[in-house]
Image (tube, grey):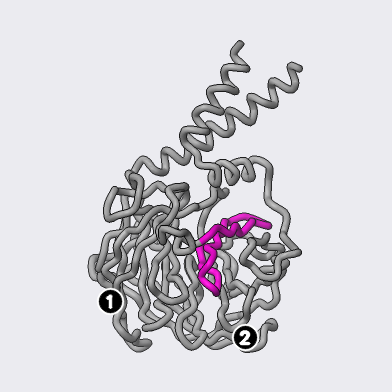
Amino acid sequence: MRRPFAVRAGALVTAALLPAALLSGALAVLAGPAASPASAADGDKGFTLEDPRITESSGLAASRQHPGVYWTHNDSDDGPYLYAVDGATGKTLARITLTGIGTPRDVEAISIGPDNQIWVGDIGDNLGGSWQYVWVYRLPEPKKLADRTVRATQYVVKYSDGPRDAESLLVHPRTGRVYIIDKKEDGGHLYEGPAKLSASGANVFRPIAPVDLWATDAAFSPDGSRLAVRGYFGGISYAWNGGRIAREGRLDVPLQRQGESVSYSADGRKLLYGSEGSHSAVVAEDAPEGSPSGSASAAGGGGAAASGKGGGSSAPGGAKVGALALVAVCAAFFGVRRLRRRG
C-alpha cells in the first residue's frame, strides 16, 4: 500500500507545485543531460556545451556580430579564457585568451555592449564580501572567430556600501552603462556604475533599485527595454524604465543542476539559460515580451520578496518551493520505478 500511495502523493504534490514547463525541466534533470539539437539553425532552440574544457559555465551572452554564436566562460581555476560556442552544434568555434589583465579570481558574468564590446565580470566573492575591490574587463569582440589572444582593458570596481558577492554583470545595449546585481539570498540590489568607467582609478557602483531574487545572472533585452534576472529556482522580468525597474512577472526558468547564466537571443525572442557542469545543457524558453500580455508567465518563480507588479509571490520560500518540487518529482519518479519492479 505504501508504494502506490507514495506515487499518488508525489504526483499530487508535483502537480500542485510545478507548472508543465518546470515539471518537464525537472524530469529532464532526472533523465540526464539533453542531446544537442544539431538540426537547429542557431542557438534559439538550445544546445549542449560539447567542449570538455567548459566545466563551470557561469555566464552567457549572445553575439550580435556572429549570429547564432554564444560567448561563455568558466567560473574559476581556468585562466583568462572566453569561449565562442556555435548555438547549432554546441561546439567551440574559438577560445580567446585575455591579456593586459591580472590573474582572474572568480569570473561570474559576461555581457555584450554597444560596438560589439565584450564585458566580463570578475565579480564573484564567495568569501562573503571579503575583497575590497573586484574587476571588470572589456575587449573588442573578434571579427573572425579563431583561437587568438586579445588585449583587454581592466577596471577596478568598488561598491559604495562595502564589499559583496555578485554574479550578474550587464551592460545596457544603447547607453553602454555597466550594472551589477549582488547575490543575496533574501534579495539584492541593482548597482549602477559611472557613466564611463575609468581604467586609472576605482569605479564606485551605487545601489539604485532592489531586486527581489537571489540572483545568479541577468541580461538586458536587445533593445534595452527589459531586464531578465534569474536565480537557481526562478526568475523575474523587469521593465527597465531608465533604471527605475518595475517588476512585470516571473520567468520560465528551467530546473537545472546549478543554474548560473541567462542571455537573450540576438533577436530578443528567446531567453537561454545555462548551467555549470560538464556537457551542460543550455535551455531556450520564450522571452516574456513574446507573450500576448507582454508579461512573463507565472511558471518557475521564486524570489526574495513580493514587490512590483506581475502575478505571483516572490517570497524567500521560492527556493524552498523549488527544492520541495524537486523532491516531489523524485518521489514520483522512484515510486513509479518501484511499482514497475513489483509488477
Query: Which secondary structure, mark 2?
Result: strand
The majority secondary structure of the magenta stretch comes to: strand
Q: Nearer the viewer, residue 310 or 326?
A: 310
**What's under tag 1, amino acid-wise?**
Val
Q: Percent x, y for residue 232?
A: 47, 50
The structure residue drawn at horizontal position 48% and vertical position 88%, both measured from the top left corner, is 115
Q: Which residues are magenta?
A: 262-286
Could one spot residue 124 in this view of the protein?
A: no
User: Please, is residue 194 above or below residue 187 in the view?
Assistant: below
Mark identifier at residue 149: 2
The structure residue drawn at horizontal position 48% and vertical position 68%, both measured from the top left corner, is 109
Query: Which secondary structure, mark 1?
Result: strand
Quarter-wise, where is residue 343 in the image?
A: top right
Residue 323 left/right relative to 26: left
At label 2, counting other C-alpha atoms closer than 10 Å, the crowd grade (few under 14, some 14-19, many 20 or more) is some
Disc 1 to disc 2, how far (Cα)?
Answer: 29 Å
Q: Percent x, y for residue 271?
A: 52, 63
